[in-house]
Image (cartoon, coloured by chain):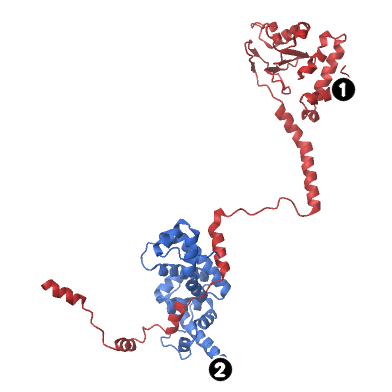
Chain colours: A blue, B red
Amino acid sequence: MEQAGNHFPNESDLIDGCIRGDRKAQAELYQRFAPRMFGVCLRYAANNEEAEDMLQEGFLKVFRKLDSYRGEGSFEGWVRRIFVNTAIEHFRRKTRLQPLSGTEEETIEGKYLTALDHMAEKDIVQLVQGLPPGYRTVFNLYVVEGYTHRQIAEMLNISEGTSKSQLSRAKQILQELVQQHIEKRKVR
Amino acid sequence: MQKDWKERLHNWTPEPPPGGWERLSDALPQEQQPAYAQKLYDFAAPPPPAVWDEIAKELNGEQASPPVIQMYPRKRWLQVASIAASLLFAVYFLPPLFRSGGQTTAPASTPVVQQGMPTVNVPTNALTVPPAETTPIATAVSNEQPAVYVANVPLPPKDNAPLRMATTERASSVLRSWLPENEDVPHVGNFIDRYIILPVTEDAAVRLPKKLYAAFRCEEQPDPSGCWERLAALRRQMAAPEQLASADFLGVMEVVQNMGSLQ
């Protein structure tokens, strides 16, 4: 990758440069945001390869849609939304969510789920990647991004109930995965 | 004064009581985002370098150079077959192309305009002649009469008189056959000094280089019929597709020499 120095200390200059198609500006924007956005992609993807695809797709969208950024809200927030939407599109292409019967959202964090607080980010992401795509997407949107079930239902074109049941199931599975993780470490 | 204390009250920022947030957060356990959620939100990882290369490649898009297409097939037999096919194409298809390019079909009633000369309307059945390398100003062929070739080659002074005598009559008769009855035949003698008119006994004209012209002054030769035959044979040879590519002076010389009768 070509080395992009700090040629654009001002964010608006950087954005303008990217809109003009200045490759240095684009490289600098990529360098600034790629690590965090790759983190977003890793959370939504099942593996690194899929995350890399999302990262590439997301940045291409960012560069192509930059002229529509009106400066409302933080630029990083705008970029992140594009990446979350990209992840959702990926998910839509692969899966169709079905409502789960007999499960309701649990509001109280389970014993094992709180153990996540003491784990390294990389390990948590690895466990999240172990969730089935639908659960993983709803979990990320609700727990990490902070969207409501209504918003998630609109984004994924599902019912609010389905979003809730998916989240509940995601937490159950995640608890099991955390439990396995802890037990593995005890054995070592 | 009133404004002053209002402003001071508005801008007053006393220190909050210690432990205020802790008490508040305890009161709002349900709304507090789990710590791991924040960790995940802030999670960052360095992407592989290849990703930027791919993005840059995509961004280049239209500017990117087109893919290189291999011009020659890798397999030997395919190369040989390609060359053979090219040669076959050249042998069978190119000569007709040259022929059609080298011949001109006179449109119906093409006016033949010469500098300082009367206009002659060529009949509809006038056919094709090879292009003259001496830039003919008018060429026409009659199916019924001997062909007439007009070229802008001035006659050599020493040959002027006999040639004029030999060709004027024939040229006049050809022109008369072309023209409507009520039109006067232009006086051929007016331009015979400036242009060579060569009648041929066949229904097509033959284009002769200037230097060969004297050899085919058939009227002056002891056996004019043999001369006409040689001219006809020459015309046929020149009209043959394989000779078209060499229709320049040297090519015509070669044709004539191959005939073996030009002495």
Q: Secondary structure at mark 2?
A: helix
Mark 2, residue position: A186
Amino acid type indicated by mark 1: Met
Q: Is residue A161 visible?
A: no
Whether residue B119 is situated above or below residue B82 in the rendered picture: above
* Foreground pick, B133 / B87: B133
Quadrant holding the C terminus of chain B: top right
Q: Is residue B140 visible?
A: yes
Q: Which mark is residue A51?
A: none
Whether residue A62 is situated above or below residue B209 in the rendered picture: below
Position of residue B22 measured from the top left corner of the image (x, y, whole percent): 33, 88
Position of residue B216 measured from the top left corner of the image (x, y, whole percent): 81, 14
Image-quadrant location for residue B122:
top right
Apparent side of residue B204 relative to residue B6 in the rendered image (left or right) = right
- Mark count: 2
* Foreground pick, B38 / B209: B209
Q: How dense is the environment of label 2, judged by Cα within 10 Å: few (below 14), some, or many (20 and up)?
A: few
Q: Secondary structure at mark 1?
A: helix
Whether residue B173 is situated above or below residue A163 in the rendered picture: above
Mark 1, residue position: B259
Amino acid type indicated by mark 2: Lys
Apparent side of residue A139 relative to residue B246 in the rendered image (left or right) = left
* Foreground pick, B202 / A81: A81
Position of residue B16 measured from the top left corner of the image (x, y, whole percent): 26, 84
**What residue is rendered at 50% in x and 78% in y?**
A136
Q: Are tags 1 and 2 found on a single chain?
A: no
Furthest residue toward right: B260
Image-quadrant location for residue B213:
top right
